[in-house]
Structures are given as structure tokens and as C-alpha cells.
Amino acid sequence: MARRSLAAEVVSQVLGWTYFVCWSLSFYPQLFLNRKRQSTVGMSFDYQLANALGFGAYTIYTSALVFDKPVRREYRQAFGDDVVTVQDCCFAAHALATTLVALAQTRVYERGTQRFSRGCLVAVGVVVGVTASAAVFVALRGGAAHKTVHGVEVDGWLAWLYWLSAVKLGVTLCKYVPQAFLNMKRQSTTGWSIENVLLDFTGGALSVGQLLLDGATLGWKGAIGDPIKFALGFVSMIFDILFMIQHYVLYNPARRRAKEADASDEDSAPVAPSFVAEASSHLLRDTTRASSSSSNGAPSRPDDDGGFDSDGDDEARPGRWSDCRRRAVLSFSV
């Protein structure tokens, strides 16, 4: 086994534990957001269901390679040293548990019109059925000699575990698509936690960085032989960048709220009441008549409709004139 400097070993360990913490924490912002809003609208149900399938397969895979002695012995005979650690097993189990909580929230909180898609349900059902059938076949195959490929029995438990790793890899490659499509369909990322995305991106970057560091200091054979770790980091980074573009550029929540506020202000703009318009009309007419009466030398008085009458009658009608003045004041106050 290749040796490397102490500094490289320390940096690798720091990168490994940091990405482990970031990825573990990345599941919680979405759970807290759902609880705060009492709603799961905006979170893709298909994404969570695919996540549950992937992390379920990954939990079984890592647990068997860590705690099952016959499987570990078969793995050592075929490939040498173990590559799966207790940290990998703990991360997978923790991710599965938090994902199941997110799925439970879809049944408890408001979900709007969102549902699991038929295609996703069928795909998950087929994968689970094939996996369970293969497990039953391996359990009932008996103790006879079997064909091996590179030291691995093609119908043994280790081969079945590799099938689970392939399931996890396939889920990782496509699980983000439903969430990205949902954001595009709604033209919004409301309900999808951006903190989850940022932590996931950080964990992916650190994971890929550790893999590259280990490859450069220990040899690239080990790095190439761990495609799941590379896929987990690299693919998550690609989709996280897409989610950040959707959140901060395409469907920016602050910009959306500003547009909605502008539209609300326009809709709630005050409209002059009819009596104000009427008062303005009376004031204009009264002013015109008063000017005309003064020029003709005839006394003016308010007529029956609140205006001035220049017929020479000096009878005062203070009630109507006060009403007209009140209307005029209202028109100016508005």
C-alpha cells in the first residue's frame, strides 16, 4: 500500500469528516422548513421517494460490508482491504431516517395538489420487487459450488450487495430531476430549502476533493474503484448549481415578492367617489355663475340645485350653500 505524508493524511481526514457533517446536516433544513410552514408544497415527493430507495439500498450495502463477517471475508478474498467504514454506515442510516421523516411529513402537512407520480411509483416498485426476489433466490440457492467472476460468486450475497450499490448509483444520477422540474413548473423555489442545497453542495465538493487528494497521494486505482462516492459528490454538485441558479436568478423569491407587492399597490389604488366628482362639478359651475353675475351687476344667490342664480332675487339659501361648500372642501381634501 502506498504511503503518504502526515500532512496529506490529516487533510484527507479533515475533508472526510467535514463532508460527512455537511451532508448529514443538509437533511434538516427541509424538515424544519416543512414544519415551520406546516406544508410540503414545493418539495418534490418523487425526489424524497427516490432518496428513500437509494439510501435504503446504501444502508444495507454498507451495514453488510461492516458487520457481516462472511460477506467481509468474501470481499477480502476478492478485493483485499475493506473500503467501507463505520462512518459510511452511520451516514447512510441517518440519511434514510431523515428521508423517511420527510416522507411522513407529506402525509401530515398541507400538500396542495402534489402527488407521487405514477412513473416514480412503478419504477420504485419494480426495483424493490427485483431486489427482494434476488435476495430470496440467494437465500434458497443451497451450498453447491457456483460460478465466480473475479472471485465473486455471481449468485452470492456479495454480488447482491453490488446490485444494491448499482441501485444507489442509479438513484443518485436521476433523483434530482423531479425537484428541478417541479421548480420550473411552479416558476418558484418556495418550499424547497436553499440551505439544504448549500450544505449538499459543500459536502459534495469536499467529498470529491478528498477523493482527488487520495488518488493523488495513494494512487488512482482506489479512487477509480469507488464510483459511488464520486457520483454522490459530482452529480450532487451539478444539480446543486442548477438549484442555486433557479433560486437566486431565475425564480428569485425577493424579486417575486416585489412584483406581487407592486401589483397589489396598483390594484388597491384609491378611486375618487362619485360624490367628490359631483362636488367638483358644482364648484366649477358656481364659480362660473358667480363671475357671470358680477359682470352683469345682478345679485347672485344659490339656486335650488346648490348653484348660484343671478335673477336678482336676494333670498338666501344658506343650507344649500353650506352643503356646496362642504362638497368643495371634500373634493380638495381627497
Image (cartoon, grey):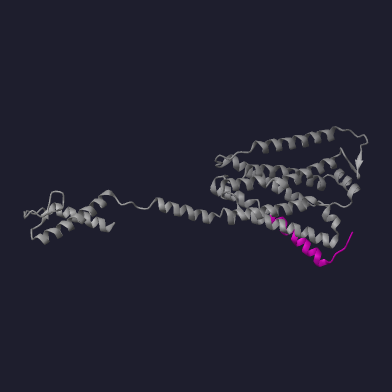
Please identify the quadrant where the N terminus is shown.
Answer: bottom right
Identified at 79% across, 64% down, the residue is: 10
The chief SS type of the magenta part is helix
Asked whether 179 or 56 is in front, the reply is 179
Asked whether 196 or 76 is in front, the reply is 196
Name the side, left or right, on which 95 lies relative to 111.
right
Please provide the residue range marked out in magenta: 1-22
Indicate whether residue 329 is drawn in magenta: no
Task: Name the spot of residue 19 as percent of width and height, x first.
Answer: 72, 57
**As displayed, is residue 151 above or below residue 288?**
above
Residue 175 found in image quarter = top right
Indicate whether residue 13 is drawn in magenta: yes
Please identify the quadrant where the C terminus is shown.
Answer: bottom left
Task: Name the spot of residue 141 as percent of width and height, x first.
Answer: 87, 33
Identified at 81% across, 60% down, the residue is: 214
Asked whether 74 or 325 is in front, the reply is 325
Q: Residue furthest right?
A: 145
Identified at 70% across, 56% down, the residue is: 203
Name the side, left or right, on which 79 lies relative to 293.
right
Task: Name the spot of residue 138 as percent of width and height, x first.
Answer: 84, 35
- Residue 249 seen in the current view: yes
Identified at 84% across, 63% down, the residue is: 217
- Residue 196 seen in the current view: no
